[in-house]
């Protein structure tokens, strides 16, 4: 779990979407061609890249609606991970 929070994996195909997701988050959606080429080099498909980009967007939208609706939290609150 901790390795995933740091976008790390021993499997290059599994690591590539994590690396791409981490780059998208750090760049607030702006990433260079280098990240795309690295992901494609280990077999990441267009569909996987779209999923990597879409999941954070969907989570943000869901969170906004939950804040507006004052939804009760039904799970344990987790302290956000910070890059150190």
Image (cartoon, grey):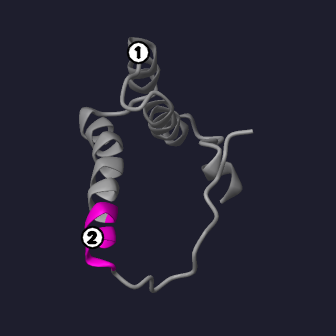
- Front residue of 61/53: it is 61
- Front residue of 65/78: it is 65
> Where is 33 relative to 53, above or below?
above
Q: Which residue is label 1 attached to? A: 32
Image location (x, y in percent) of residue 82: 66, 47
Instruction: Choose top left, top right, bottom left or bottom right for residue 34.
Output: top left
> Where is 2 relative to 53, above or below?
below
Magenta stretch: includes residue 48: no
Image location (x, y in percent) of residue 51: 29, 45
Q: Which residue is label 2 attached to? A: 68
Image location (x, y in percent) of residue 61: 26, 57
Q: Main secondary structure of the magenta part?
A: helix
Q: In this view, does 51 lie to the left or right of 76?
A: left
Residue beneath the point at 45% across and 38% down:
21
Residue beneath the point at 41% across and 32% down:
28
- Front residue of 27/17: it is 27
Q: What stretch is highlighted in magenta?
A: 63-70
Question: Dot 1 surroundings within 10 Å: few (below 14), some, or many (20 or more)?
Answer: few
Residue beneath the point at 33% across and 69% down:
67
- Front residue of 82/51: it is 82
Q: In this view, does 57 lie to the left or right of 73?
A: left
* Gap in angstroms between the C-alphas marked 1 and 2: 34 Å
> Where is 14 relative to 31, above or below?
below
Instruction: Give the quarter of the figure containing the C terminus.
Output: top right
Where residue 43 is drawn, which disc sits there? none
Q: Which of marks 1 and 2 is nearer the N terminus?
A: 1
């Amino acid at each position: 779990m901790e390795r995933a929070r740091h976008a790390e994996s021993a499997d290059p195909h599994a690591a590539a979407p994590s690396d791409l997701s981490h780059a998208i988050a750090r760049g607030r959606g702006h990433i260079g061609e280098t990240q795309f080429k690295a992901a494609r080099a280990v077999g990441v498909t267009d569909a996987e890249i779209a999923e990597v980009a879409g999941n954070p967007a969907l989570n943000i939208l869901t969170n906004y609606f939950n804040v507006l609706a004052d939804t009760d939290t039904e799970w344990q609150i987790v302290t956000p991970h910070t890059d150190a």
